[in-house]
Amino acid sequence: MAFKLIDLFSGAVCLSLGFVDQRFGGGFESIWAVDNDRAAIDTYRANFGDHADCVDIEEWLGTDEAIPHADIVVGGPPCQGFSLLNKQRKGDDRRGLWEPFMDVVERSDARAFVIENVPGLLKSREFRGIQRRARQLQFEIHHGILNAADYGVPQTRKRAAIIGVRQVTDVKMPDFPPSPTHVAPGIASPLPSWVTVRDVLSDLPKPKGTEIQNIFPPLDLHFGRTPTPMSLQRYKLIPPGGNRFDLQRIAPKLTPKCWIKKTEGGTDLFGRLWWDRPSVTIRTEFFKPEKGRYLHPNQHRPITHREAARLMGFPDDFHFCGTKIEIAKQIGNAVPPPLAGALALWVREILVAQDECCVAIA
């Protein structure tokens, strides 16, 4: 029997795919999901069913609506309040959204919870608040920073994971974090090396058109853009693995003045991906090379939505809903499914052991 799962701040698929789909982890059944993004909820429903609500969780908790019973609550409270990209982090209201998350953990009588977020969360006062609340509810806390590439994702994306498990006598906790499935190149190990950009993108043809095609995956999101002549000139001058500094060196007249004045930082801006490495972190504006290392390894264009989804670890049969911008946001904000699957397997081992222990005692 699958363990019942609630997904809060779910986005299109914050953690559910890794917990539900047997290709990644499996063993869980999504029974309720909540997010305030309509397009993301449409995507969730398209893949997991109609048990997803587009609501503000704090407003929901203020109503008489019952919270369904669940074995686990998972979610990614909005991370911008902790992100290093947010230079004005103090006073950000999003920093406190762990509190309604923990309210749902309590009211659903969950046996475990998983919070995924940016690494900065683990150094915040909010993390200490989560720990205090978890101890009050008799949860044992495990936490750490995980690199998605260590779990088969073609992307060096580092994320914080906080897992709480209700304490049960005689059930031994496995070591945390979950054991990697892949290792960095050059490390002597029986495990395979990190998955590379070449591994997941080399079979795709050149993109067609500039709009979402009205066909089912795998190629519905493999569309391009129409760059300006200036942009195309710039793309062509970026060498393999290069970035904005190469453009400045080769063609200063084609380089924006703001880049020339900024002589440090931003080494990924206008960068070209490497074929034989994992991708850098995929963010919500991956279709804009000026935002990061998002140029195709050898084609003069930014990566497509389909390519970004593959670099996140999404299978081609996962169906996204929304506009181009809305889908890009869903992809960039998602938890890579293989990483979520590793967390799912770790938690499932504990829940199965707890059930077996209870049967033995009875």
Image: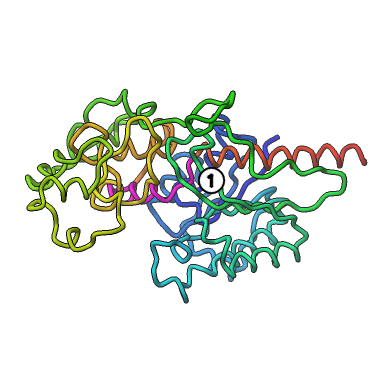
User: Residue 292 at x, y = what percent?
Assistant: 30, 49
> In this rendering, is residue 331 above or below 216?
below
Q: In the rendered structure, does residue 76 fall within the stretch colored magenta?
A: no
Say which residue appears at 39% left-offset and 69% top-offset. 87
Q: Residue 13 versus residue 227: which sits nearer the camera?
A: 227
Quarter holding the C terminus is top right
- Report if residue 335 lies within the magenta region: yes
Query: Is 340 placed left or right of 204 in the picture?
Result: right
Residue 306 in the figure: left or right of residue 289: right
Q: Secondary structure at mark 1?
A: loop
Magenta-drawn stretch, dominant element (helix, strand or loop): helix
Give the residue at the far right of this rendering. Answer: 362
Residue name at image x 72 percent, y 37 percent: 349
* Residue 354 placement (x, y as % from top left): 80, 42
- The quarter of the rendered structure image containing the N terminus is top right
- Location of residue 258 (image quadrant): bottom left
- Residue at 55 percent across and 55 percent down: it is 8
287 lies left or right of 190: left
Disc 1 residue type? Leu
Q: Which residue sits at x=67%, y=37%?
A: 2
Give the crowd class for mark 1: few <14, some 14-19, many >=20 residues within 10 Å: many
Magenta segment boundaries in residue numbering: 322-336
**x, y percentage for residue 357?**
86, 40
Q: Which residue is mark 1?
A: 15
Horizontally, residue 114 falls left or right of residue 307, namely right
Q: Position of residue 80 (x, y in %)?
A: 44, 62
